[in-house]
Image (cartoon, rainbow, N blue to C red):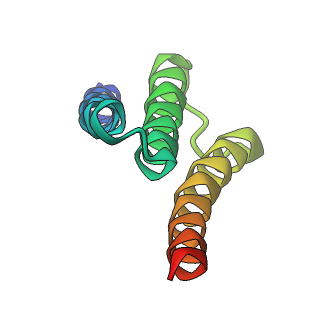
């Protein structure tokens, strides 16, 4: 029961972070913020799916692949932002 509660709290925090980055994306139209928003939304969906699974299989390879994709989006956003900054200057 506590595990499901924690999964829900983490999912909610990820959705809030996603909405936070979406707000900045709407203001600036910078894809950096869009990629961050997508990464946190993907993490939230993964946490919800894990929380609803009975019993939760957090060690399943699919859960790690979704997290890997989420972290790859974040890393890609950072690399893209740095490369775009160098090309402009």
Q: Is residue 64 above or below residue 57?
A: below
Q: Is 26 or 67 nearer to us in this picture?
A: 26
Q: Position of residue 79 (x, y in %)?
A: 58, 71
Instruction: Judge from the rendering whether residue 39 lies leftward or rightward of residue 68; answer left or right.
Output: left
- Measured as percent of width and height from the top left, residue 29 is found at 41, 38
Looking at the image, residue 62 lies above or below residue 56: below
Residue that extends furthest to the front in the rendered view of this protein: 89
The residue located at (60%, 65%) in the rendering is 80
Residue 57: percent from left, percent from top: 61, 36
Q: Quadrant of residue 5?
A: top left
Depth check: give the residue in front, 64 or 76.
76
Point out residue 76 in the picture as x, y percentages from the top left corner: 62, 62
| Picture quadrant of residue 1 | top left
Residue at 27 percent of width and 35 percent of height: 27
Task: Note whether 28 is above or below 32 in the view shown.
Answer: above
Relative side of 17 to 82, left or right: left
Q: Residue at x 24, y 31 (%)?
A: 16
Residue 85 vs residue 45, the one in the foreground: 85
> How many numbered badges does the structure rendering display?
0
Give the vertical position of 48 relative to 76 (above or below).
above
């Amino acid at each position: 029961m506590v595990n499901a509660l924690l999964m829900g709290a983490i999912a909610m925090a990820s959705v809030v972070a996603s909405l936070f980055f979406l707000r900045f994306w709407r203001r600036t139209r910078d894809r950096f913020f869009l990629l961050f928003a997508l990464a946190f939304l993907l993490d939230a969906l993964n946490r919800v799916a894990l929380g609803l699974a009975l019993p939760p299989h957090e060690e399943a390879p699919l859960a790690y692949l979704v997290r890997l994709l989420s972290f790859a989006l974040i890393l890609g956003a950072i690399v893209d932002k740095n490369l775009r900054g160098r090309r402009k200057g």
